[in-house]
Image: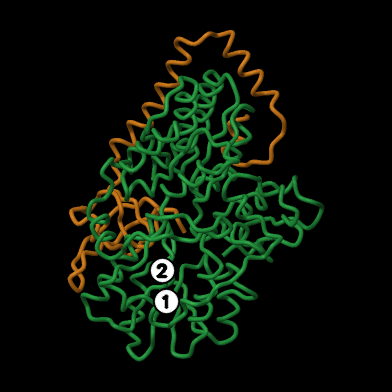
Chain colours: A orange, B green
Amino acid sequence: MCLAVPGRVLGVEDRDGTRMASVDFGGVVKEVCLEYLPDLKVGEYTIVHVGFALQRLDEESARRTLELFENLGMLQEEFGDPWEQAEQAARAGQSGPADGEGLAEEVRR
Amino acid sequence: MKYIDEFQDPELAARLLDDIRATVTRPWALMEVCGGQTHTIIRHGIDQLLPDEIELIHGPGCPVCVTPLEVIDKALEIASRPGVIFCSFGDMLRVPGTGRDLFQVRSAGGDVRVVYSPLDALRIAEENPDREVVFFGIGFETTAPPNAMTVHQARRRGIRNFSLLVSHVRVPPAIEAVMRSPDCRVQGFLAAGHVCSVMGTEEYPALAERFKVPIVVTGFEPLDILEGVRRTVRQLERGEHTVENAYPRAVRPEGNPAALAMLDDVFEVTDRAWRGIGTIPDSGWRLSARYRDHDAEHRFQVGDIATREPAECRSGEVLQGLIKPHECEVFGTTCTPRTPLGATMVSSEGACAAYYLYRRLELPARPAATSLEDSAVV
């Protein structure tokens, strides 16, 4: 219940004096109250919680975070100690079996 | 959405893990505050991917889990009254009160309805002017503004048959309570991103300074968690304790000013009891005097209900990070998602339920749950 879900605004309208939007959550469209983000526009992304848009989701900063991740790996590969990296890879390979799934399995592979 | 796929990128996750391994030199205990983060961590096995030096402790940030038993009992009492339509989010239906839950109240003839948004409950009130409609208003700073807006709208539109049973809680006083506990082992916090998307980050520097503890605002995707851990460990290794925002795509320092103004208008800060933990000063909200006539507790005169939690349930210790779920004697035996003793097992965001679902190997031999649906987590 505490999770908020990102979605894209498809349309905005005023209903009984309340600003509402239809928002697309990857195929599922729901009615969302825009009273806390009144200037949100069609095409923009937002974080929605229990039917309320709570914060604009800035695609630009999403990209910046991703760039940081990318840079982090690039820098590591570019300037890191190759011996240490090999040792880390070996240590990672030796870590015991776990029962996580999804991402953890893929990272291990 | 494309970037959501990117936030689960295993190659980037491996690089972040490499960086964490290269940074860490000694053991550190970090608390992820939010139950949604706990769920991501366990589902993706992030705690097991991290170097052995890093221990993740699960915090008190599951709203369903921390709602006190007496509030559940008040909800059950109100929902049982004739003429009442009791509306709630689905994850409250099977939270055990004393001897029963909302699901059972409905089976016994109570009109209990699940809604997606509090505004749905307001619409039900408008459509049923001869009935009393009550919405169960629980949750943290993320959920409080929608409920505040709903009460405000009820007042504005003159919908008098709508009231809120309020048990809202606030994160910063909970962080303070965790740090003040004599058994506290927490050295850094991954703060709950969506709480901060509403509240901003301005409450945190004072906490970081007072307890000399790094606080990193963290999102909910696997890469968000890894980046939060990376930044917290980097601070700890350097002897720093500042507030960092590792979730800038959804969190601004000032939060959401419109939501904060509405919170201030509709609610006032009050002491709140937390299930399994006890009362924490100034840790919650109640309706302010101006909105008292929309307060279900007042309207239905249930203020006197007081109840005791089952002695064998240790969810309070789980919520404070003092024990792990499987260290509880009744975990997975008498307490399962099908027959939960405490809310940490019944809520899918609860640490006990997450361990039960994804750590089957650590359980005593018995038929294992194979999916969320199979475990009947609502």
Q: Looking at the picture, how far across and down is residue B95, in whole percent? A: 58, 67
Residue to which mark 2 is pinned: B166
Q: Residue at x 44, y 65 (%)?
A: B167
Mark 2 secondary-structure assignment: strand
Q: Residue at x 30, y 35 (%)?
A: A61
Q: Quadrant of residue B18?
A: top right
Q: Looking at the picture, how far across and down is residue A11, in whole percent? A: 23, 60
| Whether residue B377 is situated above or below residue B122 in the rendered picture | above
Badge 2 and badge 1 in a common chain: yes
Foreground residue among B349 and A96: B349
| Whether residue A65 is situated above or below residue A3 in the rendered picture | above
Q: Residue at x 48, y 28 (%)?
A: B230
B148 on left or right of B343? left
Q: Quadrant of residue B185?
A: top right
B234 on left or right of A56? right
Residue to which mark 1 is pinned: B297
B99 on left or right of A25? right
